[in-house]
Amino acid sequence: PLFESYDIFSRSAGDTSDVVTKEMYDFKDKGDRHIALRPEGTAGVVRAFVENKLYGPEFNKPYKVYYIGPMFRYERPQSGRQREFHQIGVEAFGADNPAVDVEVITMALRFFKKLGLSDLRVAVNSLGDQESRANYRQALIDYLKPHYDELSEDSKERLEKNPLRVLDSKDERDQQFVENAPSILDYLTPAAAERFDQVKEMLDSLGIDYVVDATMVRGLDYYNHTIFEFITEIEGNELTVCAGGRYDGLVEYFGGPATAGFGFGIGLERILLVLEKKGIELPIETGLDAYIAVLGDEVNEAALSLVQALRIQGFKAERDYLGRKLKAQFKSADVFAAKALITLGSSEVESGQVTVKNNQTRQEVTVALESLKKDFPSVLAELGLA
Ligand code: ATP
Ligand code: MG
């Protein structure tokens, strides 16, 4: 759903995350419920996963889902940052095998490669398990406490509630401390460290270039173990286009059985921005398969029936609706980049024979109107258009 109970997001993302403290579009509905427009996809997916018992034995594991849709964040609008934007997200539930981490990262990478974006920096880190985090949390507090007065107001609060969040600060006052902060990787338990080693080895074995960024913590609280981001540079600015990680505690948190989870979110508008800046045009075919030139009002219904028949066969077809001169209709066929041009007048309807033209080569075939309605592919084949 585009909106959920406010708590679904605030409790899972964490009440010190920017998303919750500053960026939520929340309101009371007519029933006085505290509602929020979704700022991200994972919390709602996990809520639905638990509510519908998708962890049950009748479902294959890992249970995999994806979504594409709008997200809402009350941010300062700027390039690459909208208040309503779209994400493509995936989640895989029920396997804590590090191979899943690597497969999901690889899938996202392949998606970007397919778009022609291959110069991405792949940053990975591990947040470890609960014990690793508790150890690190203390080390971070010990390190940051002496600098308390120099931190930003937000980070002062974060230091009390969730010190890891300081590492995610975009405030310049905090940056110098982030740079020299102790590394979480030094506080991983042996099991968590071993797990992270496996992830890195598997990434190596697939030939994936990545960097370990020990200060990356991600903006949402629910992550553990592997987290990752894909970063690209646009006019000297770094832009994260994909981000995700493991969230093994989240299903349990929402009242389900302990279930592993791994997923990512891709910002669609950011992809479009990057494609535009890099001058990449996607090979999207928008041309029509057929344009029907309509000669006279008396064949209006015949044209209606023909255009429907072509569409039902799965073709992109258009026709004239405006009773324009033939020349103007032919022009439309060109603008639509129609492959085939069909001219329909009362003589065609009477004889039941129509002429179909290859709009590029001008080659023509005359076929029965009825067979055109049933089997357009063989007409296209005859014109060398299949
Ligand atoms: P950032 O550090 O850029 O604020 P984030 O950590 O808030 O990103 P996530 O919550 O991980 O971002 O969201 C996943 C992806 O969604 C981001 O990598 C980005 O591509 C996109 N995204 C996040 N916020 C916005 C926004 N306001 N407008 C457009 N895209 C966004
Ligand atoms: Mg953000």
Image (tube, rainbow, N blue to C red):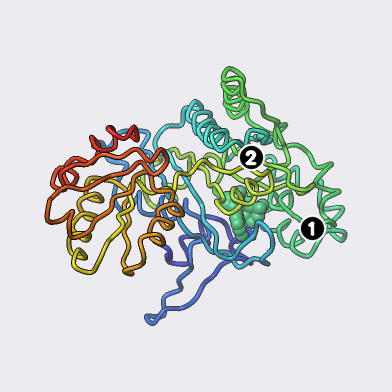
Residue at (27, 32) in percent of width and height: 382
Q: Position of residue 349 (x, y in %)?
A: 15, 56
- Residue 171 is tagged as 1
Residue at (82, 54) in percent of width and height: 174
Residue 375: image quadrant is top left
Instruction: State whether label 2 is within 8 Å of ligand 1.
Output: yes
Left or right of residue 270: residue 149? right
Residue at (35, 67) in percent of width and height: 324
Q: Position of residue 94 (x, y in %)?
A: 39, 36
Q: Is residue 225 visible?
A: no
Q: Is residue 270 visible?
A: yes
For the view shown, which residue lies furthest in the front direction? Answer: 347
Work out which quarter of the rendered image holds the C terminus and state it. top left
Mark 2 or 1: in front is 2
For marks 2 and 1, give the CA distance.
Answer: 21 Å
Amino acid on which the number 2 mark rests in the picture? Phe
Which residue is disc 2 drawn over? 230
Residue 304: image quadrant is bottom left
Asked which secondary structure carries label 1, the reply is loop
Asked which secondary structure carries label 2, the reply is strand
Residue at (45, 40) in percent of width and height: 261
Q: Position of residue 200 (x, y in %)?
A: 62, 24
Work out which quarter of the rendered image holds the N terminus and state it. bottom left
Q: Position of residue 19 (x, y in %)?
A: 60, 60
Question: In the image shown, does 369 or 45 lie closer to the viewer?
Answer: 369
Which badge, 2 or 1, is on the more N-terminal residue?
1
Amino acid on which the number 1 mark rests in the picture? Asp
